[in-house]
Image (spheres, rainbow, N blue to C red):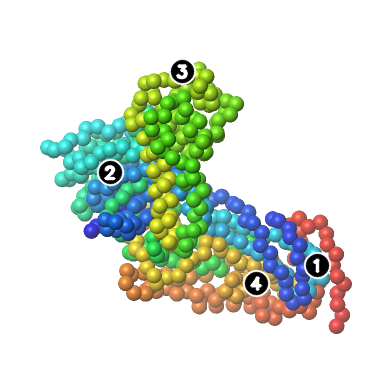
Amino acid sequence: MKPLAVSLAAAAVASLAMVPIVANACGGTFCDAGPQVMPVDQSGENILFWIDNGEGGPHTEAHIQIQYEGDPDRFAWLVPVSQVPEVLVGSQALFSNMLAGTGPTITVNTRFDGDCGFAGVGLGCGAVSLDSSVGFADSGAGTFGGEEDGGEGPQILDRGFAGAFEYVVLTGDNVDVIVDWLDAAGYAQDPDAPPILQEYLDDDFVFVAFKLRSGVGVDEIHPLAIRYPGVEPCIPIRLTRIAATDDMAIRAFFLGSDRAVPQNWPHVELNLAKLDWLGAAASSYLELVGLAIDEAGGRAFVTEYAGTDAVVTTSGINGAKWDGSVFVDLPPVEVVSALADQELLLCSNGNCDFFHPQVRPVLQRYLPAPEGMDEEAFWSDLFSNIDSIDPVAWDTQPGLAAELDERIFVPGQHAVDMLVDATYLTRMFTLISPHEMIEDPLFHETSSLGTVDNNITTTRVFSCDEGPDWIEFDDGRQVALEAGVYPQFADMPSAQRIERVPMVGPAQVEADNLDEINDLIEASNHDQLVGPAPWNCSISRLRPEAMLTMFALFGLAWFQRAPRRRG
């Protein structure tokens, strides 16, 4: 069975606390404060694959987060697939919670080494979150049209609606009939597209063409899911390269029973010693990822998290009070009260707060405010405004109850079902430019690799003698600072390890740079007055440069320094 492939084929639409401690001679106390978040703006796509091993044989679902800004009539999106899929509405809250629970966080703890001559001083620990959540959709023009079920036109295999979207599944004997249909349907064409589309046709793929339903606004856009038999996820980035940007970010999430890895692309382990620990950590991290992937040939993935899916909270995904059956045959005047009872919105004094992004657009469709009246004031008191309820809008198909089910209740329950069914979550990340998008990455599960923590932690050690301060990694390695500045290590490899992970057997190592990295660290340490080994506690005073660093970082006004010991 060929894998179904999913592509966004998209134009990018982006998008110190203080705690008391006690300083001990020849030791110190670690601190651990909450992270200081620094957002990272980056274009790219977010996609989640769920491996369903339930009844009916194994299936894969590809959930795609979509963000689009612009004219809703110009939204258009083409997805190549290996067979006619089932199209479902996805959960925006699931993506938000996955991004929040697995985003890389850099934390630099602080301690003092030796008898520094002061006590009762606490230092905060800085942390940087490297996460962002953006997704993409292609932009085109017009509406579906010109399709044919036979003759010289494309073959229409399926069509239907999924929430805010309508879709058509089509194929053809050659790329010309596909391109002609896309032109007639108003899709913006790129001269580079036909050869790529023909490649997929040659591999017996079909295409799913999406657009927004008539009258739908961009505020109604939600994730979509495509379900198909098999367990080999694929992202066909060949089509994505038409509208991709340089160093486009792709995050691939996998819910299943084991860790997911790229099948036909290398897997890269970052050399965290090259990260600028005391500088701009966010931009330094992205630069490190890009350089490491380039060392692997320009097409590779980094694993940012691998482990239990319990890190993803279900808060906001599926409310405990949600019940779609309540809205069946419910009079329109009681809708807002029922939504409030299920904690989906709260209206008071002419203002409404919405606790799901699809509630407002559904109300706008079925209970629009009369012309000249504020919609939130209208919804806040439907009983007083009962004569202003539009019966034509209320009778719009498929009906409010069915729309709430499709957009809110069913996707929410399904998202929770996926998290309950799965035991393992993997988050992979890559940066790739259009000229590198010549091979679609495939993925599979493996038990040959361990977990990966998304919390990246080191410790900055302030030395209390005449030696330099240093950064200490969790594995015990130490890097001496150059007058309080982390070395640049320009000639150091960015990838600590490059490997390929076959479906059977252990990982095949293509490059293991750990010895070279450690040699460069040792040489740098030697240049900084021999390195970490001779640092001792013979001098209890705090060096002036260390004191200035403390003032700059933590805003300390003053502290009492103990007199220097005399041996």
For the residue labelled by badge 4, is the local secondary structure a helix, a strand or a loop? Answer: strand
CB within 8 Å, label 3 to label 1: no
Q: Amino acid at mark 4?
A: Ala
- The quarter of the rendered structure image containing the C terminus is bottom right
Q: In percent of the image, x 39 and y 72: which residue is there?
A: 448
Which mark is in front, 3 or 1? 3
Mark 2 is surrounded, within 10 Å at the Cα level, by few (under 14), some (14 to 19) or many (20 or more) other residues, namely many
- The quarter of the rendered structure image containing the N terminus is bottom left
Q: In percent of the image, x 40 and y 44: which residue is there?
A: 411
**Residue at the extreme bottom:** 567
Q: In percent of the image, x 70 and y 81: which residue is there?
A: 534
The image shows residue 205 at horizontal and vertical percentages of: 23, 50
Q: Is residue 439 left or right of residue 136?
A: left
The image quadrant that residue 74 belongs to is top left
For the residue labelled by badge 3, is the local secondary structure a helix, a strand or a loop? Answer: helix
The image quadrant that residue 224 belongs to is top left
Q: Earlier in the sequence, mark 3 or mark 4?
A: 3
Q: Check disc 2 and report the residue beneath it.
A: 208
Which mark is in front, 1 or 4? 1
Q: CA distance from mark 1 to mark 4?
A: 25 Å
Q: Check disc 3 and report the residue beneath it.
A: 388
Q: Check disc 4 and report the residue beneath it.
A: 480
For the residue labelled by badge 2, is the local secondary structure a helix, a strand or a loop? Answer: strand
Q: Amino acid at mark 3?
A: Ser
Q: Earlier in the sequence, mark 1 or mark 4?
A: 1
The image shows residue 25 at horizontal and vertical percentages of: 77, 76
The mark tally for this picture is 4
Q: Amino acid at mark 2?
A: Val
Front residue of 561/96: it is 96
The image shows residue 437 at horizontal and vertical percentages of: 35, 55
Q: Earlier in the sequence, mark 2 or mark 1?
A: 1
